[in-house]
Image (cartoon, coloured by chain):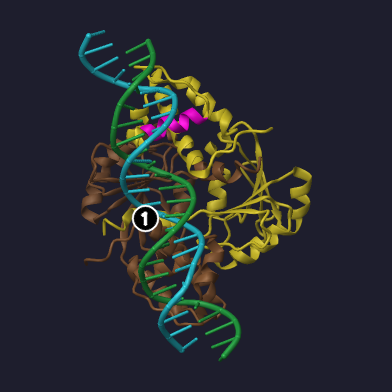
Chain colours: A yellow, B brown, C cyan, D green
Amino acid sequence: MKEKIFNEKTIKRLTQYHFILESYEDKGLEYISSPQISKYLNIDDSQVRKDIKLLNSDGLQKKGYKVKELKKNIETALSFKKNKNAVIIGAGNLGTALIKYKDLKNYGLNILALFDNNPLKVGMKLSTKEIFSMSHLAEFVSSQKVEIAILTVPREVSQEVADFVATSGIKCIWNFTPSVLYIEDKNIKVLNENLIGNFLAMVNDRF
Amino acid sequence: MKEKIFNEKTIKRLTQYHFILESYEDKGLEYISSPQISKYLNIDDSQVRKDIKLLNSDGLQKKGYKVKELKKNIETALSFKKNKNAVIIGAGNLGTALIKYKDLKNYGLNILALFDNNPLKVGMKLSTKEIFSMSHLAEFVSSQKVEIAILTVPREVSQEVADFVATSGIKCIWNFTPSVLYIEDKNIKVLNENLIGNFLAMVNDRF
DNA sequence: TAGATTGTTAATCGATTAACAATC
DNA sequence: TAGATTGTTAATCGATTAACAATC
């Protein structure tokens, strides 16, 4: 249970190496080199070798790294296989999309249910996952050992809903609304997914 | 048309300042200070002042910045109001969610249509937006002046689809699939939205 | 061998934070 | 005034890149 903790940037890069390795595996390639990986991500090849060394993976001179082995090492290091239980707060379009987004499951995100305050939605099922009333959240979190709340409510109510969610016993809040949440309790980790900022950064030098 | 170009990190922060300003406006507050903004984002308050100075916004001693004015200045600097035409490639769950995600429109993303190769989907409409066959992409891109392709296809085909999309005249590809795209044409900007990496970075020190 | 690659240290670069005078 | 804040420069920190010996 005492795994090595990597810094955030390293984790994000390792995840992308894993994506690349998956495509190499699909193509039936046995080896991959650090310059090859670095070209996908526009980073230096020495960065790639450093990151990989953190996993205690070894490469082979002239060949590079074994695709299957490196892929497995990343999976172990980032514990893809360890299930992390989550619920979605807000059964709108985005919540509905995420519940059906099977790729997340492969990386350890185990979404158990949705929560919504709309009485017309409560009791319905979305691809085997039930929609519950918000009033049952705390009970569900403790009985099902839920650690992550994925927030997909309208922007206007995101802070208010987050304040409520923060009292439920959750460990992390993954915020998909265009807002920056402020949570008093510093034991709760907040990830403000800034899709709009990423988008604006992409287009800023093009328009 | 010759706007100042900000670096990517600055743009992402300014976008989040805008989110915070929106909530201040909702609450009817007239002023906001740099330490207040910095607490939302766990950054230094001098960073906030520097970013704001880039916009040529001025603050007031003892009070901070005028909420409405600063908000407007960010909007102008990042050209939220300038429409950027886009299409979604892949009319699955995520594509469907994004087409209905109205917040994006407020920040200048103007999604015109969806494209999919499934004959059962082609011709259908999703909230006023038509689903076209992929074979019509290049024609649509040039006639409608589309500059952004949002990729929401299955991971297995993402590179192959991206290669095809790259020939259509598009300027940017916003990749939502768990893959890292490699596009030869360096005039095309690729944004690999790394949701899974962000998620793994959030939970890594908690599990 | 020649050439390509790893592993690793040193150098550089850029981003963030600290500090503080000026101001109201 | 005292206290809070801006604006800005200098210092620090950390991340990235350069360089190269060792290796196959």
For mark 1, does the 10 Å Cα neighbourhood hold few (<14), some (14 to 19), or many (20 or more) residues?
A: some
Magenta stretch containing residue A48, yes or no? yes
Residue toward you, A180 or C21:
C21
Residue toward you, A94 or A17:
A17
Q: What amino acid is found at the position of numbered circle 1 in the picture?
A: Glu
Above or below, C2 against A143 in this view is above
Picture coordinates of residue A36 (x, y %)? Answer: 34, 28
Is there any visible trace of residue B127 in the rendered image?
Answer: no
Q: Dot 1 lies on which element?
A: helix
Stretch of the chain drawn in magenta: A46-54
Answer with the quarter of the image where residue A62 lies: top left
Q: Residue at x 48, y 28 (%)?
A: A53
**Residue A191 appears left or right of A184:** left
Q: Residue at x 25, y 56 (%)?
A: B144
Label 1 resides on the chain identified as: B
- Rendered-image quadrant of the C terminus of chain A: bottom left
Circle 1 residue: B8
Q: Residue at x 44, y 21 (%)?
A: A67
Above or below, A101 against B41 in this view is above
Is there any visible trace of residue B196 in the rendered image?
Answer: yes
Picture coordinates of residue B85 (x, y %)? Answer: 31, 57
Residue toward you, A154 or B136:
A154
- Rendered-image quadrant of the N terminus of chain A: top right
Magenta stretch containing residue A63, yes or no? no
